[in-house]
């Protein structure tokens, strides 16, 4: 490892190191790129790809060591995974049983003409590895289970079913994982951090029977997905970095049509 | 009795954003939802004076009632 560190110091300039030098180090010292990046950041050197991230090397190292599970890899999940990969989160576990269909092309980050009928998680993994090969990505084409929640320190709720959201929230409560909730419909969305204390998801979905009320898939326009996914990714990073967030004690209702963004504080229920 | 009803997201379509409305004493939230032609299964969060409530709750003179739809897509 000393040789690797000497190589990194030799190649670094102005406190940064280029990707091509990190790749050369990985090849020369037979180490995964993630390990090279770990050593780079521990030396207080910033990989050039992160130099505009407004984060310190210690913060970037925290993200590199983080383990995130994104449940649902469609609109919200695909965009959240894209942002977290670019930001430098070191491990993503992507869960989705579905494959891309034409009606996904309007808003889902990794739905392209070329990926139609491919499993969403596989298409996402391929694209994400091309963006940031230092990130480890597990692509699981299946419904989520408790193991997925256990595998991560923060879980991102990018599901499209109230019933499944309630099950996921129960798993996260059981294992003490923070759940970054997001949901979209038409020009409207919501985001918040569900914890055992605030019971957020149960409050937002007062009856899973509502599943049957909307048998057809909801209409969703891409800007709503971009806004809510961006907020979910920001909240995930803040949780990992230990930064405070008002969304730990409230949820945000977003109305892109009227440009209204309303923070709803957690409140005790009244009968 | 007079109360203020505030609707969110697509519940505003063909209705209103915020309106003072008159209802008989003892009216329940569910009855107001029905009066507005909203499918109760579409209702998510209901708040009376900023406190989370339910369709079964009874409103009182001067209350502020906020009704949010279920937003479920991902």
Image (tube, coloured by chain):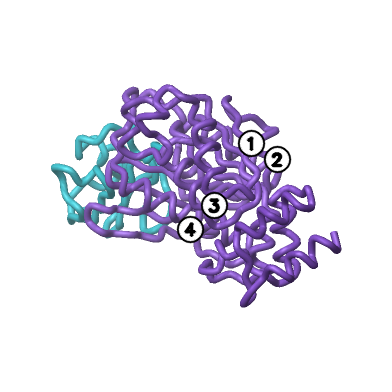
Chain colours: A purple, B cyan
Viewer-nearest of discs 4 and 1: 1
N-term-proximal mark, 2 vs 4? 2
Taking the image as shown, residue B48 lies to the left or right of residue A157, namely left
Name the residue at 55% across, 59% down. Answer: A248
Quadrant that contains the N terminus of chain A: bottom right
Disc count in the image? 4
Quarter of the figure with residue A108: top left
Name the residue at 48% across, 44% down: A203
Task: Answer whether labels 4 and 1 touch (C-beta < 8 Å).
Answer: no
Q: Position of residue B50 (x, y in %)?
A: 39, 58
**Residue B46 seen from this side:** no
The residue singled out by tag 3 in the image is A84
Q: Chain of mark 3?
A: A
Residues at marks 3 and 2 on the same chain = yes
Mark found first going from the N terminus, 3 or 1:
3
Q: Which residue is mark 2?
A: A151
Bin the neighbour count of mark 1 within 10 Å (Cα to Cα): few under 14, some 14-19, many 20 and up.
Answer: some
* Label 3 with label 2: CB-CB less than 8 Å: no
Counting from the top left corner in percent of width and height, residue A37 is at 69, 58
Rate crowding at label 4 as few (under 14), some (14 to 19) or many (20 or more) other CA atoms within 10 Å. some
* Residue on which disc 4 sits: A250
Q: Which residue is mark 1?
A: A138
Q: Is residue A175 above or below residue B4?
A: above
Classify mark 2: helix, strand or loop: loop
Residue A222, above or below A210: below
Q: Residue sitting at 53 percent across and 60 percent down?
A: A249
Q: Chain of mark 2?
A: A
Label 2 crowd bin: few (<14), some (14–19), many (20+), radius 10 Å: some
- Please say if the residues under marks 2 and 1 sit with CB atoms less than 8 Å apart: yes
From mark 2 to mark 4, how far is it between C-alphas? 26 Å
User: Quick one: A178 or A170, which is closer to the camera?
Assistant: A178
């Amino acid at each position: 490892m000393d040789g690797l560190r000497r190589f990194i110091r030799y190649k670094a300039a102005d406190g940064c190191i280029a990707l091509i030098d990190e790749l050369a180090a990985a090849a020369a010292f037979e180490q995964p790129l993630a390990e090279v990046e770990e050593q780079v950041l521990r030396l207080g050197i910033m990989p050039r790809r992160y130099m505009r991230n407004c984060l310190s090397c210690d913060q970037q190292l925290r993200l590199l060591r983080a383990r995130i599970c994104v449940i649902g890899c469609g609109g919200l999940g695909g965009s959240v995974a894209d942002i977290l990969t670019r930001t430098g989160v070191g491990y993503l576990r992507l869960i989705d049983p579905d494959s891309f269909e034409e009606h996904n092309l309007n808003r889902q980050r990794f739905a392209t003409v070329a990926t139609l009928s491919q499993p969403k998680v596989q298409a996402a993994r391929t694209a994400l590895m091309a963006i940031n090969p230092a990130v480890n990505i597990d692509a699981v084409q299946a419904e989520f289970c408790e193991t997925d929640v256990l595998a991560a320190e923060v879980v991102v709720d990018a599901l499209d079913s109230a019933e499944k959201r309630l099950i996921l929230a129960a798993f996260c409560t059981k294992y003490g994982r923070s759940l970054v909730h997001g949901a979209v419909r038409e020009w409207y969305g919501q985001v918040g951090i569900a914890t055992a204390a605030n019971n957020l998801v149960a409050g937002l979905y007062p009856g899973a029977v509502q599943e049957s009320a909307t048998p057809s898939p909801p209409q969703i326009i891409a800007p709503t997905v971009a806004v809510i996914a961006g907020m979910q990714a920001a909240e995930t990073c803040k949780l990992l970095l230990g930064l405070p967030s008002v969304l730990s004690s409230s949820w945000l209702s977003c109305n892109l049509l009227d440009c209204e963004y309303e923070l709803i504080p957690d409140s005790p229920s009244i009968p | 009795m007079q109360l203020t009803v505030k609707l969110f997201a697509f519940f505003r379509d063909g209705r209103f954003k915020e309106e003072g409305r008159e209802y008989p004493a003892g009216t329940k939230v569910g009855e107001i939802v029905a009066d507005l032609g909203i499918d109760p299964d579409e209702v998510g969060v209901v708040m009376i004076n900023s406190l989370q409530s339910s369709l079964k709750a009874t409103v009182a003179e001067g209350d502020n009632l906020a009704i949010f739809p279920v937003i479920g897509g991902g």
